[in-house]
Image: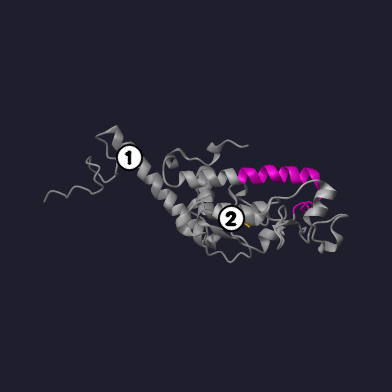
């Protein structure tokens, strides 16, 4: 499991955003572990360099996923934040780079559905787990991409079940209960999340400056830290 510090900007710790982001990270870690086991035990693989899911699709995501992604970008791609083009007419996801063989430019910060796509199952009406390979996968078990494997078949053939998308999405949806699991287009919610994290970081920087005492913590040209400049003497 990766160290949690990889997204935990010190200034976010102890804020209202820290706990939901930390719990989402735990869900992401569980996905990674169960997919590692699934990939080891089964023959289903994305074709090398495929990226079709990012070229034709941009996910709707939960606010908490946007905070995770934004926090990751603050730590790893801060220089990029001011030049992001949320109105790009690029087909598919604005975070995909068609010229990059790995396609996703925010791989470690990517949303939940991106982690699960092609390597997760769903549930049949009776609650059992099913798996249908992505149509771009190849190999003996593909059967033209039309085969849906039942839970019984998966256990018999591979001795393992994939992580289930709806179960994990449901867990993530309640991390910010006041948002009722609402989802938003990535290009709409990401700038909102980035602005909120910037605000939290600015507050933390202000508090740190102010705690040092007597300095101009609010950067307003005086030393009273009240956020307002002193009126000029007439
Ligand atoms: S966030 Fe990354 S993985 Fe998800 S759709 Fe965009 S480019 Fe693809």
SS for tag 1?
Answer: helix
Q: Is residue 216 left or right of residue 161?
A: left
Residue behind mark 2: 170
Mark closer to the chain start, 1 or 2: 2
Query: Is ligand 1 within 8 Å of the beta carbon of the residue shown at mark 1?
Result: no
In the image, is residue 158 above or below residue 209?
below
In the drawing, does residue 3 fall left or right of residue 210?
right
Quadrant location, ligand no. 1 = bottom right
In the figure, is residue 47 to the left or right of 178? right
- State the extent of the magenta-drawn residues as a range: 28-49
Task: Give the residue pinned by disc 1.
Answer: 207
Return the x and y of residue 110 as percentages of the image width and height.
60, 51
Residue 125 drawn at (x, y percent): 70, 63
Q: Is residue 77 visible?
A: no
Measure the C-alpha gap from mark 1 to mark 2.
Answer: 36 Å
Secondary structure under the numbered disc 2 in the rendered image: helix
Q: Position of residue 154 (x, y in %)?
A: 80, 52
């Amino acid at each position: 499991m990766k160290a949690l510090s990889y997204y935990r900007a010190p200034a976010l710790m102890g804020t209202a955003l820290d706990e939901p982001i930390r719990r989402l990270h735990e869900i992401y870690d569980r996905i990674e572990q169960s997919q590692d086991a699934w990939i080891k035990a089964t023959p289903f693989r994305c074709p090398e360099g495929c990226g079709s899911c990012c070229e034709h699709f941009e996910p709707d995501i939960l606010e908490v996923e946007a905070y995770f992604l934004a926090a990751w970008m603050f730590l790893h791609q801060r220089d990029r934040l001011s030049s992001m083009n949320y109105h790009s007419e690029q087909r598919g996801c604005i975070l995909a780079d068609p010229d990059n063989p790995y396609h996703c430019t925010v791989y470690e910060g990517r949303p939940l559905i991106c982690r699960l796509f092609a390597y997760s199952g769903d549930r049949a009406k009776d609650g059992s787990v099913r798996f249908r390979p992505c149509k771009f996968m190849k190999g003996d078990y593909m059967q033209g991409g039309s085969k849906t494997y039942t839970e019984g078949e998966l256990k018999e053939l591979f001795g393992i079940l994939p992580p289930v998308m709806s179960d994990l999405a449901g867990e993530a949806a309640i991390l910010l209960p006041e948002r009722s699991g609402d989802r938003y287009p990535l290009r709409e919610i990401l700038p909102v999340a980035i602005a909120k994290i910037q605000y939290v970081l600015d507050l933390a920087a202000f508090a740190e400056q102010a705690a040092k005492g007597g300095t101009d913590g609010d950067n307003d040209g005086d030393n009273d830290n009240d956020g307002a400049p002193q009126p000029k003497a007439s």
